[in-house]
């Protein structure tokens, strides 16, 4: 069926969950049960089209699909499912996806219970006044603790046990009941097809033939192929070259009306012109006010990306340009380093976004890359009253020129079994965290291996989270703790730049912005690690960590030694001295012109240092 006769039979919903709780698998079962794809055509994680998404079991890009469903009452229903990213890095995209829906299916793992991002996503959904259907997934596993998870949902989220559905997305058990509840509980879309067009963009991608393809939820009005349209926030006009919906491939139709979820091919050449959260309206006699909630993409983490071979610079530039076509939140600008050569300083939404972009560059474009230590942006006021935003440590002013520094802070939420409270509180304190409060997530009536669970809330500098914090969190909680964070603003800080010099040359890729009291500890760890991984040269190589002109740590890589006296059997001592002096002069000259090759592994190892 192309369209239900009555708009009351449309349901727009999404699936929200913590990472790896079975969101994409549940989407597969819904697609299979509604007949949107033949069973022979369905592969695991249908909506996760990227190879990287399937490998890692995460959703990186939002996807949409129209499902046709015959209800228990015999009515024909159109279910528009939008699959959301699950990671905190993509929280803005999740919020725009939720704004495009009228309801949400909240998936909670029966073996793990409520996690940090479960709570964050529930709060997002509540802010958008969505009808939430809580479900417990993976009830077929021997390690499932359904009774305890039901207790948590009742105590923490406030839902009655009778309203929670139990299912297994893998086997399909309980999924038909979920389809009935989606039709029964989630309201039909509001909005008026007769009013001026207002449509929310919740994602987009670049097509080499159609230009930017924008994914839309129509709130009011309608779109017909050939309509002249306007992006209200960007003030850009375009034409609807094609209009359609996803099933899951693009299916062109004559028009989309209020309540529909679909796409338009815009012909625009840059995905940055068609940003998530913008409002589409008619170019003539369009809406007066855009939809609320739009924010421009704001990078939070910055890192330098360099090719290991200097000849690959132009290939890297082309690769970043192509990747930017489908990722509007990736920003880049050229930079150069005396050690690493030419590369790019890139801005990312978070560490996962950084990791995914680098892996895609290496995998899809065949590049070998060096990635510098990730950092954040600092707001600096100089002694002359000038205000600067610094994202590259090499641009950090000298200590005497700085009047004040401000850095970004985040509020973190850690959910963990109570037995790990001590080690985790100690960890957050080590990473400059400031305690806020502790909340016990209800007392379990069934016991179980998960035990009593606790939510710890702290505030800490974003800078402190960018190296090994997450790995340490998982290590000290044996994998049971989960983490969510939220940007809270900038605060004044006392910081210095720690430089690393290899053979008296500053390697800006190793520079870090840290509190002065940690300079010796971090400097010592870095020079010791570099001494291990940089191969020996024919001359002695000093490695120093310095704050300004003050060296806080040093290690020397001993020179390779060639036995120049091997051919001297006895004879005059002056002959031997002459040979040794000649070797000494040669090494001195070599050092003055010698360039130490820093292997790629050195950057990776320093990146892993806490």
Image (cartoon, rainbow, N blue to C red):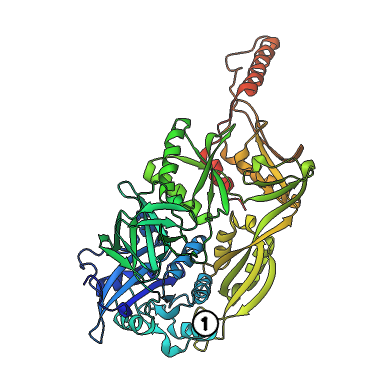
- Left or right, residue 239 beside residue 340: left
Name the residue rendered at 29%, 77% in the picture.
172
Name the residue rendered at 49%, 61% in the picture.
90
Q: Nearer the viewer, residue 559 or 238?
A: 238
The answer to whether residue 270 is above or below residue 334 is below
**In which quarter of the view is residue 162 placed?**
bottom left
Give the secondary structure at mark 1.
helix
Write down the residue under mark 1. 157
The answer to whether residue 256 is above or below residue 589 is below
The image position of residue 238, as x and y in percent, is 38, 52
The image position of residue 450, as x and y in percent, is 51, 78
The image position of residue 315, as x and y in percent, is 42, 36
User: Is residue 170 something that shows in the picture?
Assistant: no
The furthest residue to the front: 285
Crowding near the residue tagged with mark 1, few <14, some 14–19, many ≥20 C-alpha atoms within 10 Å: some
The image position of residue 158, as x and y in percent, is 52, 85
**In which quarter of the view is residue 24 placed?**
bottom left
Quarter of the figure that contains the N terminus: bottom left
Q: Nearer the viewer, residue 193 or 398?
A: 193
């Amino acid at each position: 069926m192309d369209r239900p006769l009555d708009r009351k039979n449309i349901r727009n919903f999404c699936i929200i969950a913590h990472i790896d709780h079975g969101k994409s698998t549940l989407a597969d079962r819904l697609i299979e049960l509604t007949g949107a794809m033949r069973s022979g055509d369905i592969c695991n994680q249908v909506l996760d089209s990227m190879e990287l998404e399937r490998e890692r079991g995460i959703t990186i890009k939002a996807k949409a699909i129209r499902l046709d469903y015959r209800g228990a009452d015999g009515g024909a229903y159109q279910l528009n499912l939008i699959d959301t990213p699950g990671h905190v890095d993509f929280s803005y995209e999740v919020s725009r996806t939720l704004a495009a829906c009228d309801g949400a299916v909240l998936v909670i793992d029966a073996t793990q219970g409520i996690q940090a991002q479960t709570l964050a996503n529930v709060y997002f959904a509540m802010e958008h006044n969505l009808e939430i259907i809580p479900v417990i997934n993976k009830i077929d596993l021997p390690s499932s603790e359904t009774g305890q998870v039901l207790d948590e949902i009742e105590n923490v989220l406030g839902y009655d046990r009778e309203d929670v559905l139990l299912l297994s997305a893998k086997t399909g058990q309980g999924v038909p009941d979920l389809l009935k509840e989606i039709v029964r509980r989630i309201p039909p879309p509001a909005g008026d097809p007769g009013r001026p067009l207002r449509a929310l963009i919740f994602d987009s991608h670049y097509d080499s033939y159609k230009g930017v393809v924008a994914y839309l939820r129509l709130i009011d009005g309608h779109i017909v192929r050939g309509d002249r349209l306007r992006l209200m926030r960007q003030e850009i006009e375009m034409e609807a070259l094609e209009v359609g919906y996803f099933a899951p491939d693009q299916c062109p139709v004559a028009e989309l009306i209020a309540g529909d979820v679909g796409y338009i091919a815009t012909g625009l050449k840059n995905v940055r012109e068609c940003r998530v959260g913008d409002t589409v309206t008619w170019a003539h006699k369009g809406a007066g006010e855009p939809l609320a909630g739009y924010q421009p993409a704001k990078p939070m983490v910055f890192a330098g990306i360099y090719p290991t071979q200097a000849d690959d610079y132009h290939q890297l530039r082309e690769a970043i340009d192509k990747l930017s076509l489908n990722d509007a939140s990736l920003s880049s600008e050229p930079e150069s380093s005396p050690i690493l050569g030419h590369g790019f300083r890139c801005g990312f939404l978070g560490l996962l976004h950084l990791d995914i972009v680098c892996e895609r560059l290496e995998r899809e474009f065949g590049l070998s890359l060096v990635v510098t230590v990730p950092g954040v942006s600092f707001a600096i006021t100089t002694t002359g009253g000038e205000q600067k935003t610094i994202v590259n440590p090499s641009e950090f002013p000298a200590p005497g020129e700085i009047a004040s520094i401000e850095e970004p802070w985040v509020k973190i939420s850690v959910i963990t079994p109570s037995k790990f409270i001590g080690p985790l509180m100690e960890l957050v304190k080590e990473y400059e965290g400031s305690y806020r409060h502790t909340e016990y997530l209800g007392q379990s009536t069934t016991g179980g291996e998960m035990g009593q669970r606790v939510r710890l809330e702290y505030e800490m500098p974003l800078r402190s989270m960018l190296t090994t914090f997450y790995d340490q969190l998982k290590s000290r909680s044996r994998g049971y703790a989960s983490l969510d964070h939220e940007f809270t603003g900038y605060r004044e800080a006392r910081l210095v730049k720690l430089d690393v010099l290899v053979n008296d040359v500053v390697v800006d890729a190793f520079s870090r912005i840290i509190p002065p009291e940690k300079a010796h500890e971090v400097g010592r760890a870095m020079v010791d690690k570099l001494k291990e991984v940089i191969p020996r040269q024919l001359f002695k190589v000093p490695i120093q960590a310095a704050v300004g002109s003050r060296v806080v740590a040093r290690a020397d890589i001993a020179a390779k030694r060639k036995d120049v006296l091997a051919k001297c059997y006895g004879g005059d001592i002056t002959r031997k001295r002459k040979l040794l002096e000649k070797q000494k002069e040669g090494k001195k000259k070599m050092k003055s012109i010698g360039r130490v090759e820093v292997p790629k592994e050195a950057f990776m190892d320093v990146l892993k240092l806490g």
